[in-house]
Image: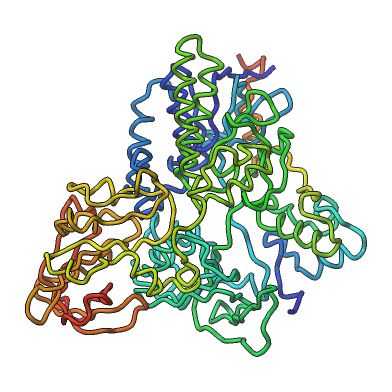
């Protein structure tokens, strides 16, 4: 006879969804056991050094690693949560018995309810020599660099331009690694335009309608052959080119990690929009098995913000079912969370998710305000190249040149509708507005703007600049966000680049805001010849200048 | 493209050629292909190859992805020694 431990709620997975689920339930008195297979909590957040998008309420503008610290702190303080680290769930059986490998023992548990927040795994790609050493998943590269401080290579070819591909490319550059190019098979960039623009300003080419044919190398990767694709995704003859690199990083999407769900015979179905095989579930995150819930990427691939809200919904739903009191209050909080999710998914970038969910019989798109699901501007050129069109820029710059005469003003180079508001929330003068919906594009009220530059450090997409056109008779000043080391010194001469990473002119650093408030996104004021104030959007510090 | 140089299952070193040959022979489910080629039987339990094989079946047979199932996934999820199994169970006699 074996001893089986009874549990109220078992949460599997200590990432953003699992942590949020545990907290939501524990705050209503549910006894939670949180099982995490690694020796530390955090899931993917542990390597996300960039700032998050989304609404301020869900930690937008905060770096992933800092969101994680807050969540772990709350979990550790909560007496209702027991954290099981280095605890891999090995199996879930038909009678709902769960086995967990912990402390070199296989232990048995009988939970009243379970929330699976097991996340996702990376997709792999079939091409010639795809087993050569030096071919990595983007997640592996990010873990090596940002968790263990190990450089994966010196010159990387990135395959895939979704947000992960773009973010990891940027982080590679931050770590001093060259990114040879970003290759994207689709005719347009998959991730947010602001991430793409950031890379273009740094001189990284983004090749849309291109694919990798094969990896080259004897013992390890020495290069790759890429080629162009036509509108039917067929190879265009004669377009092959060799790209030299010592690593190929695959960022071709994630797929829900449904292995444990399949052990329990939870119904799954293939929904390409959600990343692959996903569990059928209702709006409260409950699967086809009663008292078995899902949250986060395992229920369909989305952003971490959505995962945290789904975790809350699942946790609250369990609390509502098990708890004896505060049912109305819980119900209210579930509704709030659902509205928040709806808002996040209501823009054009949420279109795919909405389509996927409707295939699962959820939401049916009926609640969504279609007004926000189309782009406000024509951004086809931007999404193909990462560089905004003249037309796009005209829309965001002052309509009259004389506005620049009043002094420094903030310029927002954010052209795409997606749920994000740190620029709006950071402005002390209420000069930035997105017209009452988080999915709208922000516009600056140049009358109210004082050019203080707070927004330059707060925009997660590095899309805010301050321009002081008439700094002197012959020069202008542009305040730019800067996230690289070494930092420039005051008075230093730096190379200034345009939106495509082309060298424009030399500039002089006249001020650096790089304190606690800027949180590692320095706002650097660069003095440049007046003729370039509309083009200068990036700079590089010369290596030799720093001893 | 040289099908022999494209790896589909990295754990068990199964190539695209082997997968395509199996489908041509009439094995048109992921589960069957797992049994005849060993793809998906390695430490990653098919996380790398499962979706690629399903897509290959879909392309070669014309069957939509929605009609293709992944392989069965059984406990234990990941490797475990017999010692770990027995240590975790408290036997009646032990008390």
Given the current orientation, which residue lies at the most extreme bottom position?
A238
Quarter of the figure that contains the N terminus of chain A: top right
Residue B24 position (above or below residue A326): below
> In this view of the protein, which residue sits in the foreground, A343 or A406?
A406
Where on the picture, by quarter, is residue A484? Answer: bottom left
State the image coordinates of residue B33 (x, y, percent, origin top left): 83, 56
State the image coordinates of residue A46 (x, y, percent, origin top left): 41, 48
User: With A252 as the anchor, is A444 left or right in this view?
Assistant: left
Quarter of the figure that contains the C terminus of chain A: bottom left
Where on the picture, by quarter, is residue A188? Answer: bottom right
Residue drawn at 28 percent across, 61 percent down: A464
Residue drawn at 69 percent across, 50 percent down: B45
Q: How is the image coloured?
A: rainbow
Residue B89 position (above or below residue B95): below
State the image coordinates of residue B68 (x, y, percent, origin top left): 80, 50
Residue drawn at 57 percent across, 80 percent down: A224
Given the current orientation, which residue lies at the most extreme right position?
B25
State the image coordinates of residue A47 (x, y, percent, origin top left): 41, 53
Where on the picture, by quarter, is residue A445? Answer: bottom left
């Amino acid at each position: 006879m074996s001893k089986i431990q009874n549990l109220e709620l078992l949460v599997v997975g200590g990432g953003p969804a699992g942590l949020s689920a545990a907290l939501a339930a524990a705050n209503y008195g549910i006894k939670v056991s949180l099982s995490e297979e690694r020796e530390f909590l955090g899931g993917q957040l542990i390597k996300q050094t960039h700032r998050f998008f989304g609404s301020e309420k869900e930690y937008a503008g905060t770096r992933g690693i800092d969101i994680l610290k807050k969540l772990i702190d709350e979990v550790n303080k909560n007496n209702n949560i027991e954290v099981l680290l280095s605890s891999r769930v090995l199996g879930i059986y038909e009678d709902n018995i769960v086995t967990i490998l912990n402390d070199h023992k296989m232990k048995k548990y009988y939970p009243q309810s379970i929330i699976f927040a097991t996340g996702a795994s990376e997709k792999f790609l079939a091409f010639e020599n795809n087993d050569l050493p030096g071919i990595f998943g983007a997640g592996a590269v990010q873990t090596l660099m940002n968790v263990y401080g190990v450089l994966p290579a010196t010159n990387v070819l990135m395959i895939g331009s979704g947000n992960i591909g773009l973010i990891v490319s940027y982080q590679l550059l931050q770590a001093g690694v060259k990114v040879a190019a970003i290759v994207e098979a689709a005719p347009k960039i998959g991730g947010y335009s602001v991430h793409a623009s950031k890379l273009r300003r740094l001189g990284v080419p983004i090749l849309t309608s291109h694919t990798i044919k094969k990896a080259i190398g004897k013992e390890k990767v020495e290069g790759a052959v890429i080629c162009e694709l036509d509108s039917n995704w067929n190879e265009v003859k004669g377009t092959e080119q060799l790209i030299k690199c010592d690593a190929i990083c695959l960022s071709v999407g994630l797929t829900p990690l449904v292995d444990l769900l399949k052990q329990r015979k939870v119904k799954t179905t293939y929904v390409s929009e959600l990343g692959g095989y996903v569990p059928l579930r209702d709006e409260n995150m409950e699967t086809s098995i009663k008292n078995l819930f899902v949250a986060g990427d395992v229920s369909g691939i989305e952003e971490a913000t959505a995962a945290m809200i789904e975790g809350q919904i699942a946790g609250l739903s369990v609390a509502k079912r098990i708890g004896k009191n505060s049912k109305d209050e819980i119900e209210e909080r579930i509704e709030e969370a659902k509205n928040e999710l709806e808002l996040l998914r209501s823009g054009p970038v949420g279109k795919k998710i909405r389509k996927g969910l409707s295939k699962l019989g959820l939401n049916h798109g009926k609640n969504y305000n279609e007004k926000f699901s189309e782009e406000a501007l024509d951004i086809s050129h931007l999404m193909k190249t990462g560089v905004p069109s003249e037309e796009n820029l005209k829309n965001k710059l002052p309509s009259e040149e004389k506005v620049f005469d009043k002094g420094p003003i903030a310029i927002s180079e954010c052209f795409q509708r997606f749920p994000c508001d740190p620029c709006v929330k950071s402005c002390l003068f209420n000069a930035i507005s997105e017209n009452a919906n988080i999915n709208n594009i922000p516009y600056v009220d140049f009358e109210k703007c004082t050019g203080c530059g707070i927004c330059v450090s707060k925009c997660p997409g590095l899309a805010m600049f301050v321009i002081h056109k008439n700094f002197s008779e012959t020069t202008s000043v542009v305040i730019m966000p800067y996230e690289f080391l070494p930092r420039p010194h005051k008075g230093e001469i730096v190379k200034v680049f345009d939106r495509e990473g082309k060298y424009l002119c030399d500039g002089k650093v006249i001020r650096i805001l790089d304190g606690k408030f800027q949180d590692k996104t320095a706002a650097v004021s660069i003095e440049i010849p007046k003729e370039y104030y509309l083009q200068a959007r990036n700079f590089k510090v010369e290596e030799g200048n720093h001893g | 493209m040289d099908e022999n140089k494209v790896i589909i299952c990295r754990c068990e070193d199964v190539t695209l050629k082997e997968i395509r040959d199996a489908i041509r022979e009439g094995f048109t489910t992921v589960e069957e292909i797992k049994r005849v080629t060993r793809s998906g039987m390695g430490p990653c339990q098919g996380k790398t190859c499962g979706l690629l094989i399903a897509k290959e079946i879909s392309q070669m047979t014309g069957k939509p992805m929605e009609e293709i199932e992944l392989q069965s996934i059984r406990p234990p999820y990941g490797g475990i020694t017999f010692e770990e199994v027995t240590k975790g169970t408290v036997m009646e006699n032990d008390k």
